[in-house]
Amino acid sequence: MNRTLLRFRLKHSLPGAAFALGGLILFGLLMCGAYQAFGMDRNLAEALPGSEAMLRAMLGERGALMWDLTSFLAMAWRHPIVLAVIAGMAASYGSAFLAREVGDGTADLLFSRPVTRSRLFWNDLAVSSGIMAAVTVLFSLSLWVAASAMGLSPPGVAQFFRAGVLTLAFALALLAVAYLVGSLLSDGRRAMAISAALFIAMYMVDAVGTLWDRVEPLRPLSLFAYFTPLDSLKARPEGTGNAIILFAVAAAAVALSHVVAGRRDL
Amino acid sequence: MYAISTDSLTKHYGRVRALRGLKLEVVQGTVFGFLGANGAGKTTAIRLLLGLIKPTSGSATVLGRDSVTEGADLRREVGYLPGELAMYPWASGQELIGLLGGFYPETPWRRELCDALEMSAADLRRPIREYSTGMKQKLGLIQALQHAPRLAILDEPSRGLDPVIQRSFFDLIRRISGRGTTVFMSTHVLSDVEHVCDRVAIIRAGELLVTDDVDSLRRRKVHRLEVTLAQPADMSWVLETGASLTELSYPPATYVIETADRLGAVLRRLGELPVVGMVSERPRLEDVFIRYYEGQVAKP
């Protein structure tokens, strides 16, 4: 690892990441506060018969829904705002390494140093994945702290840890896919737009597939289908299985983008 | 010993043949000018030398290392100024130099460079987005030369520099060349080449036209004489010598004579005529360059 490069990348990525994390934590606090202040357990339980389909789509849950705090927290975790922040960060970081460097012309400066592309790739990935890990883990932790501090009796910290690991796996899978897109293109904005469009398409497949049986067979193609914090919070084995699948996708996409980045012209 | 040696170096982008069988040898310690119009293939050749792109066929050896398989190692001793210089606008000059210099052992040379190019510490603390084109170019030169490389590859180095800084830049090139650094300079500004280069190569449409010493190339120039006579005279003898003749005006009787190798004979005959004025411009490399570009000179 090149320390100067790590410091440089961190310095210029941290403000944005801190802003995103602050937003996520604030969102979690508001959700927990709203749950407590407005008795949302009762309200949502009463509303459940009419809005179960929508809630199931949000949770990525195929089976019958039992409404309680755990389901509410899982809904907060998979809320479109949270997903948009995580996917946006992944698309932005993934497109920055090669596509944006080449498109902006800064690749000529960076890649003409006495360092292999492979090393630059791992450096960049270390910074991006480190930031994604910090954001997802701190967000998960903040939800547990907020729910506990408000006396909501959330699931144990072990379940939160599992959900945090699942969120990290999900974020890394998105990040790796965005890296792959970025490795193939020479324009940062285009790479970011394509990654974002891909993520939206995957989300739609997952959400619609939850509700509509004809689309359901396509759900395994969507990374969102494996992001099931409700499984982790309820300590179901599916949560661990999904985390493994997401980590495997991340590893495969990273390996592929590493090969592409090493072979392409700059 | 060659600092750069290429063998049939070829690069195609789809159907576009950016570089065709380039065979180039740059002797260590020389200042080498790589001349060509925009789109001639200069930048493609440089990017191949640095291992940023891979050749379609052929090979390039830089400081004894293969550009494809030993790219990272060869770049340790190379300083590179890109032609289309893009920088991180949010970073300060100091940060950028620190980032790019962090890959090499530290040298005291950076301070000297900043002084030579009149880049103050206050300038370096400012964000790059506030820099003028000339300041960016100076920063580009500093980052390229700060580690005292054995080979400096400079793509359009004088672009955006004001005349005063250009002069300092040429002095700088002579200084680093005097210390043994090989300078490979791509440009289409012929005066740059005339100022500092020992040898020059001319490239057109991806194909090398000629490689020669600057002085030797200059000797291939066309001498252009603008002669004014007291009264009109029969000038058909000019054509007999193999020179070309253009009647410019009358009165006064002014003729333009252009000759590559019959200057002595022309001058002897002119001595017999009532010459009242004669203008002979300093030989320009540009004339040679244009003649090569227009295909008036056969490839050697």
Image: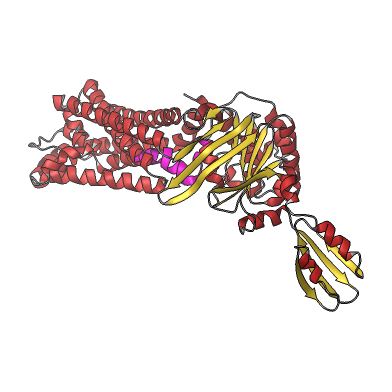
Residue at 53% x, 26% y is B73
Image quadrant where residue B112 sits: top right
Q: How far across and down, in percent of the image, does residue A5 sit?
A: 50, 30
In the current view of this chain or complex, which residue is farthest to the bottom? B251
Q: Quadrant of residue A158?
A: top left
- Answer whether residue A91 is magenta in the image: yes
Q: How is the image coloured?
A: secondary structure
- Tell me if residue B177 comes above or below residue B11 in the rendering: above
Q: Looking at the image, which is closer to me, A266 or A222?
A: A266
Secondary structure, magenta segment, majority class: helix
Residue B268, position as x, y percentages in the image: 88, 61
When the figure is inspected, residue A249 is found, relative to residue B215, above or below; the finding is above
| Span of residues in magenta | A89-111
Residue nearest the observer in this picture, A224 or A49: A224
Q: Nearer the viewer, residue A219 or A87?
A: A219
Q: Quadrant of the N terminus of chain B?
A: top right
For the question of whether residue B45 can be seen, the reply is: yes
Q: Examine the image and state in which quarter residue B170 appears.
A: top right
Judge left or right: residue B225 versus residue B2. Answer: right
User: Residue B236 magenta-drawn?
Assistant: no
Residue A245 in picture, x, y percent from top left: 21, 29
- Counting from the top left corner in percent of width and height, residue A54 is at 15, 45
Left-right relation of B65 to A227: right
**Of residues B229 and B158, which is closer to you in this image?**
B229
B56 relative position to B133: left or right: left
**Residue B89 can be seen, yes or no:** no
For residue A255, above or below residue B288: above
